[in-house]
Image (cartoon, grey):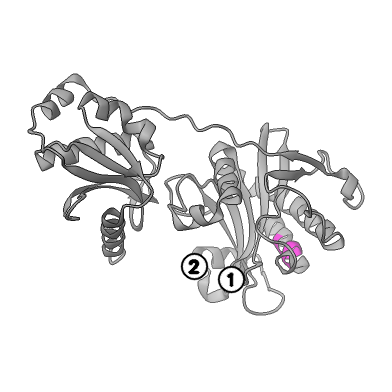
Amino acid sequence: MRALVAAAADFAAVKPWEYMCDCDVVGLMDPVANETRIGCVLGNAGEVFGAVFYRRASGLRWIMKMLDSPADTLNGDAVEGLDALKVEFVPKREISKADLAVLNALNFRPSGKGCVWPQFQSAEPGWLPWFVNQKEAEQMLVDLPRLTLFSKLVREHLGLFADRTLNEVPFLPDPMPGGPLRVEDLNWRPLIAPPESCVSFQANSGQLAQLGALPRVPKSAYEYDCSIAHGGAVLQNGRPCYSRISLLVEHRRGILLGFELGLGIEPLTESTGRGLLKLLLKNGFLPQRILIPGLRLQPVLEQFCNALQIELKPSERLPSLEEAMASLDQFMQHGPF
């Protein structure tokens, strides 16, 4: 931690957020773990200052989606699939007691005032941000100095990303050169995120028979979604994880038909399918059509809905469902679950 804090101080001294945007990303190769990671500087907007390292398939998909459609990523379920390590520089009042104890034990004295206290966090799909472990600290100790060197190079060549597409990423050499990093050391290549494997929800014959016996309401439509709840968290093995809300709303009148809570760390297929199954049984009726937001849940639910002869229709906007989800999420923020 002493070495990692020193590396964070070196990075902060460069102040790369003054001239780099969060879309000015850099590729980092880890030959030991056989892994590609993406480094990113935060702070150009003057709000959050730090560095993020996106890792593994889920993290790479997340950052590529952000680069391609930043508004969709930020306005949608921003924590879904996020897998990254982060150092953020915050005011002393925002440092947790555990992090502050570590910094005090290291005799850390920040340079300047304001957002100068380093806070290291680990983000994994379904989990709330948590403390970094030994392996993650060692990974950051490798990646952070490399991002610092790259930031210095960008400062000397402010037009480095000009005429480059958003998915064209400069990869650093491995091993790094003994002297200063040069433009010709960079290996520009398109970053293609690993495809996301999607599994269809499989209900058993008993469950399908139970649902098939329910009366069907002609010309009826329900709205359904299953997504991470930002307001509610539960402890799982001593660590807080997000809740996942399955929500069913009557389309025409916007009446809330029910909701189910699950764990954010559960596979999306299982949470989505099980939630819809339970809500349909509780409601006691089958609709003619189910509307879902976008295409995200279509491959998960299509086979299940076909078996029940329910039309599954993706929609761009579902105001009643959005309002219900926002209201429930706000309610959950008032207390732990």
| Residue with the mark numbered 2 | 97
Q: Secondary structure at mark 2?
A: helix
Q: Position of residue 49 (x, y in %)?
A: 63, 66
Magenta stretch holds residue 11: yes
Looking at the image, is mark 1 or mark 2 nearer the viewer? 1
Magenta range is: 8-12
Please report whichever mark, 1 or 2, sits nearer to the chain's N-terminal start: 1
Q: Using the rendered image of the protein, determine whether residue 130 is visible from the camera's viewpoint.
A: no
| 296 in relation to 166, above or below | above
Q: Which mark is residue 47?
A: 1
Magenta stretch holds residue 304: no
Residue at horizontal 54 percent and vertical 51 percent from the top: 122
Q: Compute the Cα span from label 1 to label 2.
A: 22 Å
Q: Position of residue 204 (x, y in %)?
A: 22, 22
| 254 in relation to 192, above or below | below
Please indicate whether residue 265 sits to the left or right of residue 210 in the image.
right
Q: Position of residue 132 (x, y in %)?
A: 56, 51
Q: Position of residue 239 (x, y in %)?
A: 40, 50
Residue at horizontal 65 percent and vertical 58 percent from the top: 22
Q: Amino acid at mark 2?
A: Lys
Q: Using the rendered image of the protein, determine whether residue 63 is visible from the camera's viewpoint.
A: yes
In-front residue for pair 2/150: 150
Quadrant placement of the N terminus = bottom right
| 266 in relation to 317, above or below | above
In-front residue for pair 334/251: 251
Quadrant placement of the C terminus = bottom left
Residue at horizontal 76 percent and vertical 53 percent from the top: 145
Crowdedness of circle 2 by 10 Å Cα count: few (<14), some, many (20+)? few
Q: Secondary structure at mark 1?
A: loop
